[in-house]
Amino acid sequence: METLKTIAARKSTRSFNPDKRIAKADLDTIVAAGCAAPVGGADYKSLHLTVIADPAALDTVAQAGRQMMHSDTNPLYNATALVVVSASAEQKFPGIEYANAGCIVENMLLAAADLGIDSVYIWGVSVGMAENRELWEKMGVPEGFRPVSAAALGYGTDSGATGKELSVSLATNYV
């Protein structure tokens, strides 16, 4: 298995080539990896994925993000796909939707890296979408669900950027 190499190769990309689209088969593989993530209490029905790859829809989401963040910068970094993780208002455990979304997004980011597709974990846009009911309804988020996280995907403009070497870099103690 090449899992550790993929983890080390994964990097956050904040500049995507808007003209280079992701193949549908690759996007399906990335979404399938997200669906394979562990979910608290095996409550998969409490989660929903919305794949946004239409350029006009991406522009609409980016514009909403700009307004929410009071910025002229594209909050999607010109990504050509966005996978939004939404969670049901009904959760078995308080806050578990954020842990579940984190696992789902991480699986998608790793799958993307394995396929040679760049990515970045998106928080602000999902918060902006959650505050804009009209937008998330327009994007097909089911009633009773709200966006909690997202993964932006595409091909980066900086081909020289590399991942990292695996190391214990967070404060850690062993008992």
Image (spheres, rainbow, N blue to C red):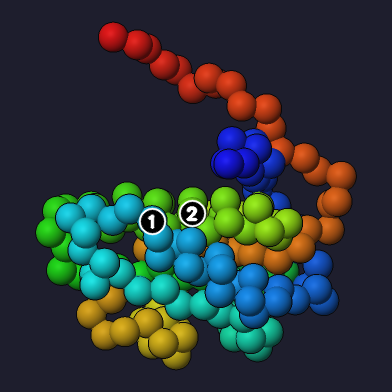
Residue reaching furthest front?
1
Question: What residue did someone put label 1 on?
Answer: 37
Q: Amino acid at mark 2?
A: Asn
Q: Is residue 81 visible?
A: no
Left-right relation of 79 to 37: right
Horizontal and vertical percent for residue 154?
Answer: 70, 66
Question: Residue at 33% across / 53% down in the picture?
Answer: 38
Question: Residue at 45% across / 77% down in the picture?
Answer: 50
* Disc on the earlier residue, 1 or 2: 1
Left-right relation of 159 to 1: right
Horizontal and vertical percent for residue 126?
Answer: 45, 66
- Near mark 1 (Cα within 10 A), the count class, few <14, some 14-19 or many ≥20, is some
Give the quarter of the figure containing the N terminus. top right
Question: Residue at 71% across / 73% down in the picture?
Answer: 22
Front position in the image: 154 or 36:
36
Q: Secondary structure at mark 1?
A: loop
Question: What residue did someone put label 2 on?
Answer: 107
Left-right relation of 119 to 106: right
Q: Is residue 172 visible?
A: yes
**Pointer 1 with pointer 2, Cβ within 8 A:** yes
Horizontal and vertical percent for residue 63?
Answer: 60, 77
